[in-house]
Image: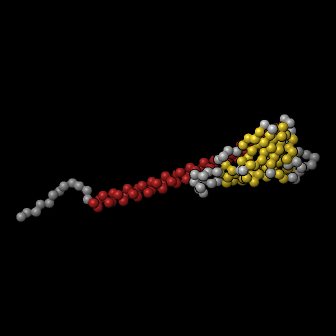
Amino acid sequence: MQITKSKQAGITILEIQMYGVLFAIFIVILSQFFASSIELQVRNTSTAAVDQEAKFVIQRLQFDGLRASEVTSPADLGQTAQNITYTIGGLANTYQLQNGVLQLNNNEGTVSVTSPLVTVSNLQVKRSGNPGGKHLLQISFDVDSSNDIAADSGKYSRSFSTVIGLR
């Protein structure tokens, strides 16, 4: 009796298991890379939103400060307020915080100056300068991102300050 070995092509169970393990490792590495890139994108979006909103707020306050004929709040030198009231064309324009949104109030209504992407807090305005000279407004505020997509990793907060010269 003669035993012959057959040489059929095929895959053993050990090879299938090895390919499965390699494929699983590849998928884990790929998913971690994908999660990291999404987290980085959320963080960059939050940073950009905070910086852009703050820049817009500062430019808007400076623009209206230059157009104003009078600043009624804060009224006196050394006084600090949590709002700014400019008189422009005889109309009182008040910037104030309402539930984390910087709003502009006047006789024509209320307009949100900041978007829902950010939350503004700690608005402080101090009037300074010389009694006989031109006055300055020292303005400081905090801006936080309102990104709920990636709770902690997407949050970004920054403090801003500027000085506006009055004419």
Q: Residue furthest right?
A: 132
User: Where residue 90 sits in the image (x, y, percent)?
Assistant: 86, 36
What residue sits 27% from the left and 60% below the top?
A: 13
Residue 130 is left or right of residue 67, and the answer is right
Quadrant where the N terminus is found in the figure: bottom left
User: Where residue 160 sits in the image (x, y, percent)?
Assistant: 73, 51
Q: Please tell me which residue lies in front, 126 or 116.
A: 116
What residue sits 72% from the left and 50% below the top?
A: 99
What residue sits 72% from the left and 43% below the top?
A: 112
Q: Please tell me which residue lies in front, 118 or 68.
A: 118
What residue sits 75% from the left and 41% below the top?
A: 110
Q: Does residue 167 appear in this view?
A: no
Q: Please tell me which residue lies in front, 70 or 137.
A: 70
User: Where residue 165 sits in the image (x, y, percent)?
Assistant: 83, 44
Quadrant where the C terminus is found in the figure: top right
Q: What colour-coding does the image apply? A: secondary structure
Q: Residue furthest top?
A: 89
Q: How many marks?
A: 0
Residue 55 is left or right of residue 154, and the answer is right
Residue 136 is left or right of residue 7, and the answer is right
Q: Residue furthest bottom?
A: 1
Q: Residue furthest left?
A: 1
Q: Does residue 19 appear in this view?
A: yes
